[in-house]
Image (cartoon, coloured by chain):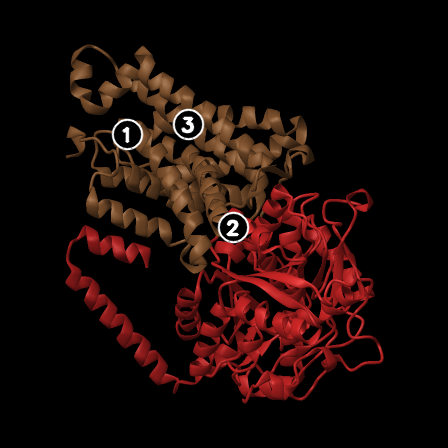
Amino acid sequence: MQIVFLIEQIVNGLVLGGYYLLIALGLSLIFSVGGIVNLSHGAFYAVGAYISVEVTKYLGFVPAVVVTPVAVGILGIFFERHILRRFYAADPILSLLVTFGFAMIGEQLLRIIWGAAPIPASMPSMLKGPVIIGDFLFSQYRLLLLAVVAVVLAGIWYLLNKTSFGRVVRAGIQQPDMVAALGIRLKPYMTSVVILGVGMAGLGGALFAPISVVHPAMGVEIMAVAFVVVIIGGLGSFWGVVLAALLVGVVRGVTIHFVPAAGEASMYVLMFAVLLARPRGLLGERIEKFE
Amino acid sequence: MKKFTSNSILNAKPISRRNVLKAGAGAAAVGAGATFGFPGILKAQTGAIKIGHLTPMTGFLGGLGEWAVLGIQMAAEEINANGGVLGRKLEVNSEDSINPNTAATKAQRILERDGADLLMGEISSASALAISQVAERNKKLFMALGPRSDTLRGKNCNKYMFCTDIPNTVMVNAVGGALLRDGLVKGKKFHTLTADYIFGHDLLRAAKAFFSANDASLVGDELIATDVTDFSPYLLKIRQAQPDIVCLNLAGNQVTNFVKQYAEFGLPYPTVGFNLNTSDAWAAGPGNLSGTWPTVWYHTLNTPGTQEFVANFTKKYGKPPENHAWIEYVSLKLMARAMAETQSTDTHDLIKYFESGAKFDILKGREAYFRASDHQLIQEAYPFSVKEASKAKDQWDLMDLGPAIPGDNEPLESIYPTPEQSGCSL
């Protein structure tokens, strides 16, 4: 029976990993292409959660999940054009400071508009409840969430690997100067990457709002995990982030199964171990401009 | 001050700034000397009475802190509109206490540099413990308004701290009767989830005492870090343990996260809990919360005092007060009364007054008083149960308030630990 419980935790950890992935992948994309550690990524996630709660009131839950990433993506356009764009070539410390400041402004705006107290959010009752497959229990909602993540993931992968858009973005990650020399302006591509990245964060916010506390500082909570995932996965690697997210989810679940008190620390220990063995992360590529 | 700094940067002669500072200090010394040091005292008598208010505004208790600020500031405004206390205005400065370390540092600064007369506030039992030690060192009063740890007012009590919320033992007793009546205790197997800090540990102790006194057993017992937001691994462990009932000793955002995810996973075991703040219940969203819980106060309490307070609060802020808004409001009011009655803001006069057993109207059916042996406010508590969604009048009308505990003919202290059990020696 013990082994069944353990497998149950591992499978649940994989589902949880999907949940982290949505935030971490966008963070990694913006980092890879623009060289900017977007500390305000969590703020977009929080804004997404709040927008989805408001939209749900008028249109219902499913439309809210569709509208929110679009709305957050539009915010992303302004963010990229007026803020991030100024810092691609600058000292990384400046972009760290400016995105950190932006995160604080975002959190305080949420506090001013909606208050510090958490706001209520529920999912439609038909989505609640378990699915029992054999000995395993799953949350129906999380399986659905996993399916959405898989679709988004497939879409992003296709976009990056099978389209001309993706070729330019991947080339831009490795050789921005060469891409420019070939007469391709990277700026619109950057805008699109940021729209995608923060849009995913917004989608994450909309999907997590019914199962976590919606409060102004929720972005800070998710950022720690997202960072750890990106660092473990390795810079510039799509599959690295996917692998790392799943690994973090599984390690956390298994740790809680055996040593509950170490549950929240487990991902940091994992990060430590991975960095000792592979300083570039699990599948991290060598990126010239960061060396 | 600002002009000063920019000048010194402009003329790039730091020495001139130093000279000016020296001159300023000299002038201040001369000024003080000329009047024999008395103006300091005179000024303290005529200026505002400064109250340093520390409360978490961020972190897992931050949502509760916002209510705390609304409550205490409303009380201050009412008091000042009626002429203040001893002819002086009350000045309540609210700050984010963040965590025990920062809380202690800020408390020291507020007393030392800002010259506050006393400290009030706090929700976290861990931060309150840190602040109480600063208060003791500085020999200033600290009124802890939100913390519920028994240990805080027991083993960790000190002469300078008074606690106004109900302790964990009372939380357990307030709901215990209702659980026994509903057949949710005797012979049942419990799985508990407990917030992993002083408050939770101490609530778990009270819960365990209650279980063993009533023939219930524990099949699982998990400590949950305060920053846990995903409970899914714990939910699986609960299912593996196959309890009859799940018992929650969680705090702040933990409660809301748990009840949302418990509803999401749809586990069949009923939940009971020994700690719930109305704000956590409001944040859970419709259809997620169930069961009977304890409370110190709820805005539907049918007393004239409460109804008047609720009406004024709702008029001012557009929403009814949460229990932290209420406790902060009544606490500042009783502090103001203590100052008025003793005609003093002196720490020792106030302590003596509170220890005298003076009765206070805290907008409940029965009056409350501080127990001299451990400085905690002795008062009624209530069970409250989640209402059927169809019966709720509005989004705030989530709970049905039960009868006050203890009953009318029993002494208030019967739901509290005895002074011996409390273990406080002042």
Q: Position of residue B409 (x, y in %)?
A: 85, 80
| Residue B308 occupies quadrant | bottom right
Q: Earlier in the sequence, mark 2 or mark 1?
A: 2
**Label 3 neighbourhood size at 10 Å, few (<14), some (14-19), many (20+)?**
many
Q: Position of residue A175 (x, y in %)?
A: 18, 21
Q: Which residue is mark 1?
A: A237
> Residue at 39% across / 36% down in the picture?
A41
Q: Earlier in the sequence, mark 3 or mark 1?
A: 3
The shade of chain A is brown
The shade of chain B is red
Q: Which residue is mark 2?
A: A1
Amino acid type indicated by mark 1: Ser
Q: CA distance from mark 3 to mark 1?
A: 22 Å
Q: Quick one: SS at disc 1?
A: loop
Along the viewing direction, whichever of B210 and A102 lies nearer the viewer: B210
Q: Are marks 2 and 3 in contact (CB under 8 Å)?
A: no
**Label 1 neighbourhood size at 10 Å, few (<14), some (14-19), many (20+)?**
many
Q: Quick one: SS at disc 3?
A: helix
Q: Which residue is mark 3?
A: A76
Along the viewing direction, whichever of B367 and B380 lies nearer the viewer: B380
Q: Are marks 2 and 1 in contact (CB under 8 Å)?
A: no
> Residue at 72% across / 81% down in the picture?
B413
Amino acid type indicated by mark 3: Gly
